[in-house]
Amino acid sequence: MAEETTNTQPLVGIIMGSQSDLKVMDAAAEILEHLGVSFELTIVSAHRTPHRMIDYAESARKRGLKAIIAGAGGAAHLPGMVASLTTLPVIGVPVKSSNSIDGWDSVLSILQMPGGIPVATVALNGAQNAGILAAQILGTTNAAIADKLEKYKISLKDKVMRSVEELRR
Ligand code: RP5
């Protein structure tokens, strides 16, 4: 996945605090691609590029985005700050960065938002689920995406059932 990706009329914005987050955040892009959801992907740092973060969050709805997936590690202020600046749903991905205290720093700084500014927080390094959740939000009003999600769930069930069959042999 390229550092910065945009496909036609993105519906989901994937942002992350550093290029070092990309190895985790790529999973959100991959599942969105699989589910036929258009997205853009770029790096926006709350601490190193605060003005870029404000521009990104404030313009997101006008640019046609319907949800934002924001991943960061350590003192992970990006998802919460973006959520404070937009009325779009924000899904936070705590990233276990290299100098992290076992990922708890990322998890707690994204999870423990004050009342009024929600961030839908997924598991540590849970970028795939963030992508699925964004698709599910879009699937409430987009039948094509809902259909892809239905097929994806069937594929999960089929995989388990194949394992069950293998164990029976
Ligand atoms: C955060 O600091 C980033 O989201 C990343 O997870 C962490 C480390 O960033 P780098 O020092 O690798 O750029 O802002």
Image (cartoon, rainbow, N blue to C red):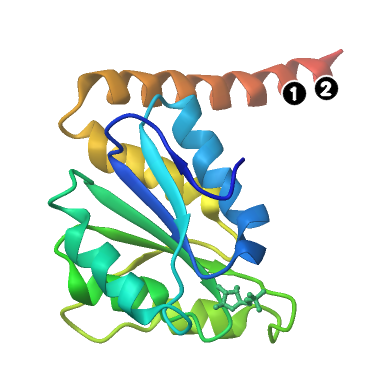
Q: Residue at x 27, y 50 (%)?
A: 67
Residue type, mark 1 in image = Ser
For residue 163, the mark is: 1
Q: Residue at x 66, y 65 (%)?
A: 20
**Residue 114 pos. (x, y %):** 25, 87
Badge 2 vs badge 1, beta-carbon distance below 8 Å: yes
Q: Under tag 2, what secondary structure?
A: helix
**Residue 60 pos. (x, y %):** 22, 55
Question: Marks 2 and 1: which is nearer the front?
Answer: 1
For residue 167, the mark is: 2
**Residue 27 pos. (x, y %):** 58, 45
Q: Residue at x 55, y 36 (%)?
A: 30
Residue 110 appears left or right of 68:
right
Asked if residue 118 shows in the view, the reply is no
- Find ligand 1 in the image and state its quadrant: bottom right
Q: Under tag 1, what secondary structure?
A: helix
Which class describes the residues within 10 Å of circle 1: few (<14), some (14-19), or many (20+)? few
Asked if residue 89 shows in the view, the reply is yes
Above or below, 155 against 18 in this view is above
- Between 168 and 112, the one lying in front of the other is 112
Which class describes the residues within 10 Å of circle 2: few (<14), some (14-19), or many (20+)? few
Q: CA distance from mark 2 to mark 1?
A: 6 Å
Q: Residue at x 50, y 26 (%)?
A: 34
Above or below, 36 against 51 in this view is above
Q: What quarter of the picture does the N terminus occupy?
A: top right
